[in-house]
Amino acid sequence: MRSALVLGTGLIGTSVALALAARGVEVYLSDTDRTAVLTAAALGAGLAEEPAEVVDLAVVAVPPGRVGDVLVDLQARGVARHYTDVASAKAGPERDAVALGCDPEHYVGGHPLAGGERSGTLGARADLFQRCSWVLTPMPEADTETFNTVLELVSLCRAIPVVMEPAAHDRLLALVSHAPYVVARLMAEQVRREGNGVVDLAGPGMGGLAWTAAADPELWGDVLRANATEVADLVEDLAADLREAAVGLRALDTAAESGREHGDVMRGLLGGRSMDDSGIFGGRGGLPARCRTVAVPISDQPGELARLFADVALAGVNVEDIRLEHPAVRQTALVHLAVAEAEAGSLERALSVRQWPVRQANECAMG
């Protein structure tokens, strides 16, 4: 990739531009907010102008509800060879784009699962996506060159590609991000109604909730509109669970009288299992308890890393971490792919079939 247009210079768009510019890509910046464009350019994200020639990739970094219109307009003007977006909902925007006449052959939807403490252009960082998952939702018509170009974008941003169906992405994001935001806003409103004095008693848990609830409501309004049905279904399920929890909590008042231990009631209420054992909160910061690294030598040629990522994605193996060993005196690199121990053999076989010179897997030594 030699050139790119980033349309939308908020937190995500500017961070993408900074990451690409840092890797030697010529980046052009565009936004309806001229001040945001000039600010991004001042940060070193690229040139505050439209490209004079066709660029390799256009990155649409606008709210989900605008993706279809913007994408189709860019394709009609022929500004790029390939196109992607970074919207946090996928099914709706892609459906809109197709209805408006999008060319699906040269478009692959995407969503980097990253954020920052500060929103907007000034919160952007070149390393924002490092080791974060970056979901890709290619349509069946998407050609290989477009897919590889978007994989190269993910690689240049040092993120980890994950291929998913749009509907599956939206369901999971509703579960881990969108519905939690709604719950955080509702809890924050409960605190507000109680009055200022309650803040003095708040612990770190409330701090995390407040941080979530304080996110830009205008931005979140766009996100929730794009994934409203999935979020509504989850909120209804949660409401049913909360009603059951209320019954269980009230039972604590009568537990002693009925001969039941409080612990039994609480175990029934909370499922009898510690969240520490669930694996939910391991996060991207840690690796599985048992993992192995599969080492793959690659030539120092443009597109080789993207080709490797594409073949890993086709193997259906989840990569937990990536390390690139690149000796200065050689025209080769060694890519270390950390995967769950049970999947190492499957990945080795899949890559060997695709003619990659895979080295024997070793126990993980990556942090």
Image (tube, grey):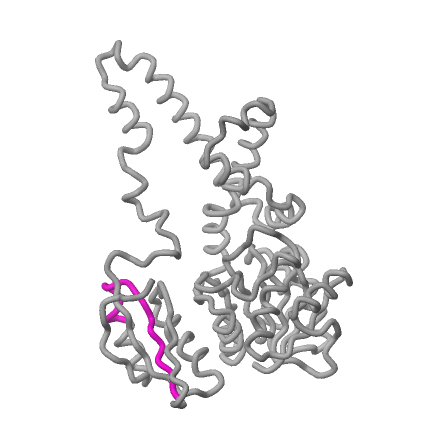
Judge from the rendering whether residue 245 lies leftward or rightward of residue 288; answer left or right: right
Residue at screen point 34% across, 13% down: 253
Q: Quadrant of residue 133?
A: bottom left
Q: Where residue 134 sits: x, y (%)?
A: 48, 63
Give the vertical position of 62 relative to 223 (above or below): below
Indicate whether residue 342 is drawn in magenta. Answer: yes
Residue at screen point 26% across, 71% down: 346
Q: How many marks?
A: 0
Judge from the rendering whether residue 278 lies leftward or rightward of residue 44; answer left or right: left
Q: Where residue 364 sits: x, y (%)?
A: 26, 66
Q: For the C terminus, give its image quadrant.
A: bottom left
- The magenta stretch is 332-346
Residue at screen point 37% across, 21% down: 249
Residue at screen point 65% across, 70% down: 44
Q: Quadrant of residue 97?
A: bottom right
Q: Where residue 50 sits: x, y (%)?
A: 74, 75
Judge from the rendering whether residue 37 lies leftward or rightward of residue 114; answer left or right: right
Indicate whether residue 152 is drawn in magenta. Answer: no
Nearer the observer, 215 or 351: 215
Q: For the N terminus, give its image quadrant.
A: bottom right
Q: Quadrant of residue 275?
A: top left
Judge from the rendering whether residue 367 lies leftward or rightward of residue 205; answer left or right: left
